[in-house]
Each structure stands twice: as C-alpha cells, then as structure tokens.
Image: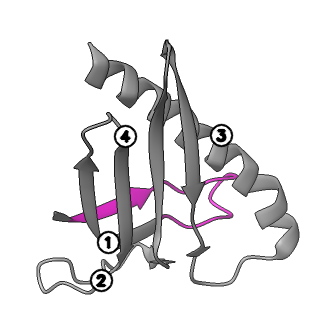
C-alpha cells in the first residue's frame, strides 16, 4: 500500500498542460499468480498541488493480471479506470490524445509484467 504522485508531461505542443495525480495504490499478488493493482485519488500533505501542473483526479480504478492456465507466456488483463484530467480540454483534443496515452499505459504494463517474471 503506498501513496503515489504521478505526473504527465505537456502534450500537443503544450496545448495540453502537464498533469499530476495523487493516488493511494494497493498492489497484491494472489496464490494463483493473479496480480492486482487498485488505486483511487487521495489528498496527502506531502503532495500539495504543484504550480505548473493541473491536478487530475482518478476515481477508483485498477487492473487484474490473470495468468492463463497452461499458457505461461500469456496473461488475461481486466482493467477499469475513470479519470478526470482537470482543467479545460476540448473534447476534440481528448478524442485525439487519450487513445495514445492508453496505448502507452498498456505498453508500460507489458514491460513491467515481463520484468516481474524475469
């Protein structure tokens, strides 16, 4: 269990300001090898809003990485999240930016899982 401050850089030639999120995160591994990462927004005195960031808000979210029996190189992923990025972003900007950021998240998750297995 930990408190995590996550930042994102500005994007689209600084049209999208840098964001920060502060979450309480629970990581857990079950006996069957399933891994859980669950998080939700939290305010913490050691993580006050920073002046050059827009504070975003994560609703309860997480993902389960579930090993597939008999297939050691494959994992079933169940994820759920809902994020309020804060600030003002036109829907057209969101529609073009968010799919790329989600793809980056899953790419990083794949790398992290491979590193855990090594």
Tag in front: 4 or 3: 4
The type of colouring in the image is one colour
Helix, strand or loop status at disc 1: strand
> Do the residues under discs 2 and 1 have CB atoms within 8 angstroms?
yes
Marks 2 and 4 sit apart, C-alpha to C-alpha, by 25 Å
Q: Distance between the residues labelled 1 and 4?
A: 22 Å
User: Which residue is under mark 4?
Assistant: 34
Is 66 situated above or below 9?
above
Label 3 crowd (10 A; few <14 / some 14-19 / many >=20) = few
Judging by the rendered image, the residue that carries numbered circle 2 is 42
- 55 versus 6 height, above or below: below
**Residue 11 rendering spot, x and y as whole percentages:** 62, 53
Secondary element under disc 2, as helix, strand or loop, is loop
Q: Which residue is label 1 attached to? A: 23
Q: In which quarter of the image is residue 117?
A: top left
Query: Label 3 vs label 1: CA separation?
Result: 21 Å
């Amino acid at each position: 269990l930990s408190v995590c401050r996550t930042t994102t850089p500005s994007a689209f030639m600084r049209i999208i300001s840098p964001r920060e999120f502060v979450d309480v995160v629970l990581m857990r591994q079950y006996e069957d090898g399933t891994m859980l990462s669950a998080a939700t927004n939290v305010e913490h005195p050691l993580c006050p809003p920073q002046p050059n960031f827009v504070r975003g808000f994560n609703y309860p979210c997480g993902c389960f990485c579930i090993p597939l029996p008999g297939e050691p190189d494959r994992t079933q992923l169940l994820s759920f999240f809902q994020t309020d990025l804060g600030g003002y972003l036109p829907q057209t900007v969101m529609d073009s930016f968010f799919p790329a950021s989600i793809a980056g998240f899953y790419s990083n998750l794949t790398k992290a899982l491979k590193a855990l297995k090594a």
